[in-house]
Amino acid sequence: MKYCSTRGKVKGLSFSDAVMMGLADDGGLLLPEEIPTYSANELAELGELSYPDLAFRVISRFVDDIPAADLKKLIDTAYSSFEHPDTTPIVKQDGIYILELFHGPTLAFKDVALQFLGNLFEYLLDKSGCRMNIIGATSGDTGSAAIYGVRGRKNINIFILHPKGRVSPIQELQMTTVTDENVFNLAVEGTFDDAQSIVKEIFGDLDFKEKHALGAVNSINWARVLAQVVYYFYAWFQVNKETGCKEIEVSVPTGNFGDIFAGYVAKEMGVPIKRLILATNANSILSRFVNDGDYSAAEVHQSLSPSMDIQVASNFERYLFYLYGKDSEAVCKAMDDFKKSGILNFTDEQLQQVQSTFTASAVNDEETIEAIAKFHKETGYTLDPHTAVGVEAGCRTRDKNLPLVCLSTAHPAKFGSAVKSAIGQDPELPTVFQGIEKKPKKLEVIAAKTEEIKAFVEKHAR
Ligand SMILES: *Cc1c(COP(=O)(O)O)cnc(C)c1O
């Protein structure tokens, strides 16, 4: 399987090259040249596999440059860090199938991809004798999942910038209580936007980037999307076994369009998903796109589901590539237009095609709180605010004749204050959080100045 860029100037990469490149050198995103498919019979053969075995089978279709036994080991190790025997268990509540993706070490779905990516990075660096310094900014979830993905690894150091005092207490502790030698938490005296623009500036200094072999872990990496494709297969098998249904619908709370794009790939591969339900919070550019063909950027609003407070979704370009019939010229032109005007326009035919794949709904904070409260009252089950956005959007737009799967992207305890305001009590603290405030911490408070942060990286880089 070879990989190419959505912008057409990078082609013929191996899987390993695509993983190490992250963002394509032409500014586009990397995709497999063909999406492999399964017939119904081939699909049925995978139905009884454990999660790691299923992951191996599905991921193998996209990888031909890592020996099977090695790949199997990378996958098995990644999912052995999940505390649930089913890895991503599915629970039925109030007629809805909730796919719990939060049983990894940081209790958010990003672990599913980042535990695998950490293993992959270490393996590929080991083989090539190279090193890597990962730099990223986080408003919460990604930082801790990335840190847990690479803590204690050979050949990799990680520097995660978070806005000092502006991430939730639990999220901060999840990062700062990792004291491994290769992990550096930088509490930046500024906002998340400050931290993010510093990271962008650092990556823009190409000499510095090359000198320190800088790497990124954001959701543009193909391996992250790929790891997430697997649980759509898994959900299908579980629900199909129970109901004998011919198709399912899946509701996905969306920020960067990464998770839902993985669902798109699974659907293209042959998983019988009738439609993907795209759920946004008040940052609704993607739901406006699906419903009205209105893709126009607005200001970012802070919401109770902060991991979805995004306007311009980085993975959207991957979907555009397929919507434009794999025409990379058209993608280049669209990205250029969007950069200039902040708007993309679509033909009626394109919009029809979008609507045959997705339905969408935007759920604001008030509706999110109501959804958590109502679900808790009716079932006793506590949704986190991101999952609640997905459940609410799913209930609004679902086809009532088909089973509805809702992806649960975080454990409610990660967003305790929103949950408490909905159900009147704190969500139960999982054991990994108990006593976390008493653990030793490792962090550096640093000014929001690019030069100071570069000096820090220079001093501590591998
Ligand atoms: C990152 C995140 C999302 C959004 O996922 P995307 O792949 O960016 O669409 C949703 N919920 C939680 C809890 C997250 O951490």
Image (cartoon, rainbow, N blue to C red):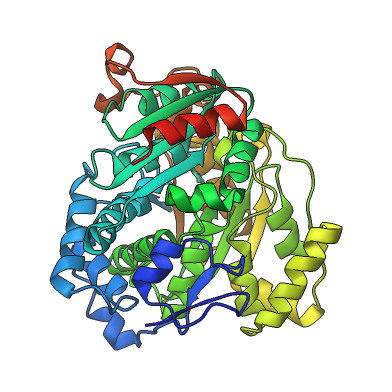
Give me the residue at 42% from left, 69% from top.
18
Would you say 342 lies left or right of 433 here?
Answer: right
Would you say 309 lies left or right of 382 here?
Answer: right
Q: Is residue 53 visible?
A: yes
Would you say 44 lies left or right of 264 here?
Answer: left
Give me the residue at 47% from left, 66% from top.
263
Position of the N terminus, as image quadrant, is bottom left
Q: Position of residue 87 (x, y in %)?
A: 25, 51
Name the foreground residue: 158 vs 128.
128
In this rendering, is residue 348 above or below 457?
A: below
Q: Position of residue 407 (x, y in %)?
A: 44, 52
Looking at the image, which residue sits at the far right?
341
Total number of numbered labels? 0
The part of the image, by quadrant, that contains residue 247 is bottom left
Q: Position of residue 200 (x, y in %)?
A: 61, 45
Name the foreground residue: 198 vs 462.
462
